[in-house]
Image (cartoon, helix red, strand yellow):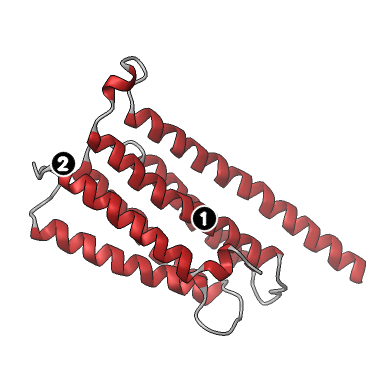
C-alpha cells in the first residue's frame, strides 16, 4: 500500500512538473516579447525611449516575483508538503488561474509604448492574482501558523490596485487620455519596484525557505 501511494504521489508530481514547464514557457515568451516591444530590432538602440525602458523595468519588476511565487506555491502546496485534503479539482483551478495570469503577462508585454493602457491592464493582471490568491487561500493553501503567503499577496495587490486605480481616475488617465507618458511610466516603474520589494520582504519565508 505504501509503495502504491508513493507511486501515485510520484505520478502526480510529474504531472505538476509538466504543467509547470508549460507555465514557464508562456512566461518566457512574455519576457521575450517585452524585449521586442521595448526596442525595434530594425532600428536598434535608436528606437529605445525613456517610456519604453521605464515600462520594461516595471514589467520585469512585476513579472519576476509573480513567476517565482507561482512556482514556489505549486512546490510548497502540492509537492513539498503532505496536503492529502486538497482535491485534484482544486489543483486544476489553481493552475488554471496561474496559467491565465501568464497569458495576461503576454498581453501586458505588448503595451510597453502605451503607458495608460499598460497601467490599466496591469491592474487587470493584479486583479487576476487577487482572484487566484483568494481561491488559493481557501482551497489549496497549506495549514500553517500566521498569514499565508497567498493571503499576503492578495492584500499587497489589493492595496496596489486601489492606489494605482485611484491615481489614474484622479488624473483622468483613461485609455484615450493624453496624460504625460513619461511621468506615468516613471511612477509605474517606482510603484512596481516598491510592490515587489514589499512582496519579497513580507513573503520571504516562501520564496527562500530555510
Q: In this rendering, would 159 be left or right of 72?
A: left
Mark 1 / mark 2, whichever is N-terminal: 1
Q: Nearer the viewer, residue 161 or 44?
A: 44
Q: Residue at x 69, y 74 (%)?
A: 83
Q: Residue at x 50, y 74 (%)?
A: 137
Q: Position of residue 11 (x, y in %)?
A: 78, 56
**Which of pointers 1 and 2 indicates the residue nearer the eye?**
2
The answer to whether residue 111 shows anywhere in this view is: no
Figure quadrant of the N terminus: bottom right
Residue that label 2 marks? 181
Q: Position of residue 182 (x, y in %)?
A: 17, 41
Q: Nearer the viewer, residue 178 or 39?
A: 39
Per the rendering, the mark at residue 96 is: 1
Q: In this rendering, would 84 be left or right of 169?
A: right
Residue at disc 1, secondary structure = helix
- Considering every residue shown, the one lying at the far bottom of the view is 145
Amino acid at each position: 500500500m505504501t509503495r502504491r501511494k508513493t507511486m501515485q504521489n510520484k505520478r502526480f508530481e510529474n504531472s505538476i512538473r509538466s504543467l509547470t514547464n508549460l507555465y514557464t514557457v508562456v512566461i518566457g515568451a512574455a519576457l521575450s516579447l517585452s524585449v521586442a516591444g521595448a526596442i525595434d530590432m530594425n532600428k536598434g538602440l535608436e528606437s529605445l525611449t525613456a517610456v519604453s525602458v521605464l515600462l520594461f523595468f516595471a514589467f520585469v519588476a512585476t513579472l519576476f516575483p509573480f513567476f517565482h511565487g507561482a512556482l514556489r506555491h505549486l512546490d510548497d502546496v502540492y509537492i513539498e508538503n503532505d496536503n492529502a485534503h486538497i482535491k485534484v479539482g482544486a489543483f486544476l483551478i489553481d493552475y488554471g488561474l496561474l496559467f491565465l495570469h501568464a497569458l495576461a503577462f503576454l498581453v501586458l508585454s505588448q503595451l510597453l509604448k502605451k503607458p495608460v493602457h499598460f497601467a490599466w491592464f496591469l491592474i487587470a493582471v493584479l486583479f487576476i492574482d487577487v482572484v487566484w490568491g483568494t481561491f488559493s487561500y481557501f482551497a489549496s493553501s497549506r495549514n500553517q501558523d500566521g498569514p499565508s503567503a497567498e493571503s499576503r499577496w492578495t492584500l499587497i495587490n489589493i492595496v496596489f490596485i486601489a492606489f494605482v486605480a485611484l491615481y489614474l481616475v484622479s488624473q483622468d488617465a483613461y485609455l484615450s487620455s493624453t496624460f504625460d507618458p513619461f511621468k506615468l511610466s516613471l511612477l509605474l516603474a517606482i510603484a512596481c519596484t516598491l510592490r515587489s520589494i514589499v512582496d519579497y520582504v513580507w513573503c520571504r519565508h516562501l520564496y527562500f525557505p530555510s
